[in-house]
Structures are given as structure tokens and as C-alpha cells.
């Protein structure tokens, strides 16, 4: 393989589609209390989480996204229930975090979200795909004898 090909393949394999998501809670909330004091919630999974959904007080904030972090601004002060869930079939267990927290006015509240590790089936699948990616081009390459 040429060094350029190795570089392109490496960039593709080690790149991430996960995003830092920024949300304005007031656009999603059905809160009619009209609280003037608001705060910010920062959620960061221990590693990128796939197919992530987040609700705050049963308002869907994020739906089935690949996430590096989530920053939710303009959350009214007070007690809130956050549900952070998701994850593809490849996780060992379902990602399902319920967090009760208090938002303080003009403050940033941060929470670390645990993400399950990948299952053995996932690593087997990745191994088979990787092996096929190496073996098929090698077998399919014609050899010339002169």
C-alpha cells in the first residue's frame, strides 16, 4: 500500500462523527412559569456516545445523535429530571442514566455520563470486517506471471 492510502484509511477509521451539541432549552420547554433566572447544564459522556437521546422534565432535547458533549442553556432554576439514554446494539448494556439535579441561576452545572463498553460481539464483527477488508483485495488482485 502507498503511504497516502494508509493515511487516508487511518483518517477515516480514527475520525469521529460525534458532535458537541448546543441547545437552547427555552425553545423545547413547555414551561409556562416564566422563570427569569436561568442556568446552563453541561453533560459529557466519558467517551463519545452513539444514538443518544436526552430529555429534561420529559421534553425531548436531543434525539438519536452521536455526542461528544451537550450544553443546554437557558434552563429555569430549580429541580429538574434529566434522562440520558441510547446506545446501539454494540454496547454491553443499555445506556440509561436518570439524574435529578438542581439548576442554579447564572451557573453552569456539569455532569459526567458513564458509557458502557462495547460487547464481545461488536469486536468479533469489527474483526471479521477488518479481516475481509484485508483478505478480499489481496485475493482479488491478479498476479501476473511472465
Image (spheres, rainbow, N blue to C red):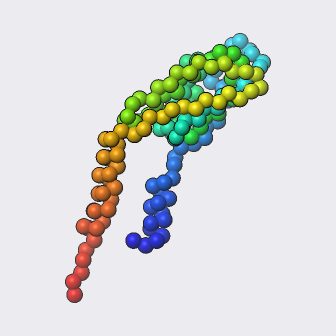
Q: Where is residue 134 in the image (x, y as percent from the top left)?
A: 32, 62
Q: Where is residue 8 in the image (x, y as percent from the top left)?
A: 48, 63
Q: Is residue 10 above or below residue 109?
A: below
Count how many numbered circles sit on residues in the image.
0
Kindly identify the residue that appears in the image at 28 percent across and 71 percent down.
Answer: 141
Query: From this viewpoint, which residue is outermost toward the top?
Result: 33
Residue 5 seen in the figure: yes
Kindly identify the residue that appears in the image at 53 percent across and 43 percent down.
Answer: 18
Q: Relative to residue 123, is residue 6 drawn left or right? A: right
Quadrant that contains the N terminus: bottom left
Residue 23 seen in the figure: no
Kindly identify the residue that appears in the image at 32 percent across and 51 percent down.
Answer: 127
Specify the quadrant of the image occupied by residue 41.
Answer: top right
Is 2 or 118 nearer to us in this picture?
118
Q: In this view, does 15 lie above or below 138?
A: above
Specify the quadrant of the image occupied by residue 131.
Answer: bottom left
Q: Relative to residue 61, is residue 137 drawn left or right? A: left
Quadrant that contains the C terminus: bottom left
Q: Relative to residue 7, is residue 69 drawn left or right? A: right
Q: Where is residue 47 in the image (x, y as percent from the top left)?
A: 52, 40
Amino acid at each position: 500500500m502507498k503511504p497516502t492510502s494508509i493515511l487516508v484509511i487511518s483518517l477515516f477509521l480514527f475520525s469521529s462523527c460525534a458532535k458537541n451539541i448546543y441547545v437552547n432549552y427555552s425553545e423545547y420547554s413547555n414551561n409556562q412559569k416564566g422563570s427569569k433566572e436561568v442556568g446552563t447544564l453541561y453533560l459529557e459522556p466519558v467517551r463519545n456516545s452513539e444514538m443518544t437521546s436526552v430529555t429534561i422534565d420529559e421534553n425531548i432535547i436531543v434525539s438519536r445523535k452521536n455526542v461528544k458533549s451537550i450544553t443546554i442553556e437557558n434552563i429555569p432554576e430549580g429541580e429538574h429530571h434529566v434522562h440520558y439514554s441510547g446506545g446501539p446494539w454494540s454496547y454491553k448494556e443499555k445506556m440509561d442514566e436518570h439524574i435529578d439535579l438542581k439548576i442554579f441561576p447564572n451557573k453552569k452545572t456539569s455532569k459526567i455520563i458513564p458509557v458502557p463498553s462495547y460487547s464481545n460481539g461488536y469486536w468479533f464483527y469489527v474483526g471479521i470486517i477488518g479481516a475481509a477488508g484485508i483478505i478480499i483485495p489481496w485475493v482479488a488482485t491478479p498476479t501476473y506471471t511472465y
